[in-house]
């Protein structure tokens, strides 16, 4: 699948691609490095699709459980919940970032060290068809960055 995506990206201007295939580009993918004993973390990125599409799932060979979450204010409490899909409107850059949509990395078997690469497979649906997009998120030590940190204790299912 990775090869297929790369081919579309490379020869898209030369060869007509199937009508259903959206060209999905992902930039600035990163994951939050964790402290020892911390079982959850978040991954973030910018996603852009050249056709209306939806992110319908994420998996990783390195993480036992991956969910797509949205975090938002509920009154004055920041809460997050799992979402079934994130809309990727044609041509619009959708940000997965601390405090908003994010990819939740759960049941981590070991801490994520800064610099480590977390491979993620995004499943994108467009025109009723699904394709996968491979993403490599580099772990960053985001402590004290000023970005809203992910509160693992506020995890409700
Ligand atoms: Cu979350």
Image: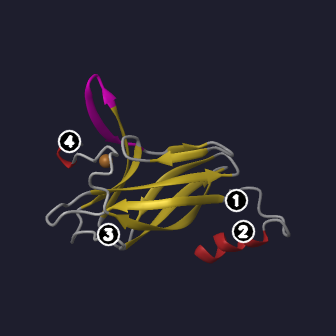
Of pointers 3 and 4, the one earlier in the residue sequence: 3
Residue 155 picture quarter: top left
As measured in the structure, the alpha-carbon distance from the residue carrying label 3 to the one carrying label 4 is: 24 Å
Secondary element under disc 2, as helix, strand or loop, is helix
Asked if residue 91 is positioned above or below residue 4 in the image, the reply reads above
The numbered disc on residue 21 is 1
Looking at the rendered image, the quarter that the N terminus falls into is bottom right
Residue drawn 48% across the image and 45% down it: 85
Residue 157 picture quarter: top left
The numbered disc on residue 101 is none
| Extent of the magenta region | 73-83
Task: Provide the residue designation for mark 3.
Answer: 114
Colouring chosen for the image of the structure: secondary structure
Q: Nearer the viewer, mark 4 or mark 1?
A: 4
Of pointers 2 and 4, the one earlier in the residue sequence: 2
Mark 2–mark 1 contact, CB under 8 Å?
Answer: yes
């Amino acid at each position: 699948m990775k090869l297929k995506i790369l081919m579309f990206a490379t020869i898209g201007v030369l060869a007509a691609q199937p009508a259903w295939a959206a060209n999905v580009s992902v930039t600035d993918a990163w994951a939050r490095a964790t402290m020892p004993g911390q079982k959850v973390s978040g991954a973030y990125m910018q996603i852009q699709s050249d056709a209306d599409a939806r992110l319908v799932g994420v998996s990783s060979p390195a993480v036992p459980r991956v969910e797509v979450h949205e975090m938002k204010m509920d009154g004055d409490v920041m809460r997050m919940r799992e979402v079934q899909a994130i809309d990727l409107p044609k041509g619009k850059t959708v940000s997965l970032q601390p405090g908003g949509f994010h990819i939740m990395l759960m049941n981590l078997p070991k801490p994520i060290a800064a610099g480590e690469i977390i491979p993620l497979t995004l499943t994108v649906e467009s025109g009723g068809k699904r394709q996968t997009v491979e993403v490599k998120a580099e772990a960053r030590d985001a402590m004290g960055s000023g970005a809203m940190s992910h509160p693992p204790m506020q995890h409700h299912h």
